[in-house]
Amino acid sequence: MKLIITSLIAALGFAMAQPDASTYITCQACHGADAKGLQLGPNLKMAPSLIGSEYVVGKPELLALIILKGIQKEGADYAGVMAGMEAMFADDQKLADVMTYVRTGFGNTAEAVTVEQAKAYRAQWADIKAPVTRAKLSELAK
Ligand code: HEC
């Protein structure tokens, strides 16, 4: 009995540590199932790779900013547009899950994001109403 309870607790703990992978389905449409960016042609991708991206594995608040508010489209490097997904990720747990999923998956080894952190990042960027520019992002990344 004790063993059953112990393994049950261990299994629960493991389940809780795993981010909900279904949250990535949204990103997959453009960033691809392998996170390398969906390839549309020999020289055209829907979106950039999320593997090793400074905005994925770097400061987590910037990843939250990108997901919530999007990136201002300035060039034609990618076919897609990174639109803000604030409504889709209105739930802090969901935001934490997708952030953790991309930061710890696909060979990325950044730290997981807690629901408390996700909540704090949402509050931090509450006043931003438009997609952020690349210039602003690189300034914030310093
Ligand atoms: C409709 C297509 C689309 C969807 C859906 C999408 N993205 Fe993007 N994403 C883009 C495009 C296009 C860019 C490049 C934006 C630019 O520079 O104009 C981008 C850029 C990014 C970047 C910056 C990467 C870098 O290194 O510059 C991150 C991080 C990112 N997306 C994360 C996500 C996450 C996480 C999701 C899911 C919650 C997601 N994206 C969903 C199209 C998309």
Image (cartoon, rainbow, N blue to C red):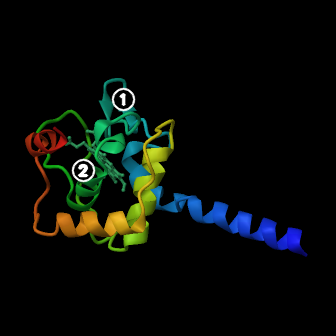
Does 126 appear above or below 111?
A: below
Q: Earlier in the sequence, mark 2 or mark 1?
A: 1
Depth check, front residue: 133 or 73: 133
* Residue 110 image-quadrant placement: top left
Q: Residue at x 77, y 70 (%)?
A: 8
> How far apart are the alpha carbons under marks 2 and 1?
29 Å
Using residue 85 as the reference point, say whether residue 9 is left or right of it: right
Decide if ligand 1 comes within 8 Å of the CB at mark 2: yes
From the viewer's side, name the closer residue of 94 and 8.
8
Looking at the rendering, in which quadrant would you find the C terminus?
top left
List the residue tagged with mark 2. Answer: 62
- Identify the image quadrant of the N terminus: bottom right
Residue at x 25% of width, y 37% of height = 78
State left or right for residue 10 relative to residue 89.
right
The crowd level at tag 1 (other Cα within 10 Å; few <14, some 14-19, many 20+) is: few
| Percent position of residue 107, x then y | 51, 35
Check disc 2 and give the amino acid type: Leu
Secondary structure beneath label 2: helix
- Numbered disc 1: secondary structure: strand
The residue under the point 48% across, 52% down is: 101
In the image, residue 79 above or below residue 7: above
Q: Is mark 2 in CB contact (under 8 Å) with mark 1?
A: no
Considering every residue shown, the one lying at the far right of the view is 1
Quadrant hosting residue 44: top left
In this view, the mark in front (2 or 1): 2
* Most distant residue in the top direction: 42
- Pointer 1: what residue? 41
As drawn, the label of residue 124 is none
Where residue 76 appears, x then y in whole percent? 17, 35
- 10 Å crowding of disc 2: few (<14), some (14-19), many (20+): many
Going by the numbered disc 1, the residue's amino acid type is Gly
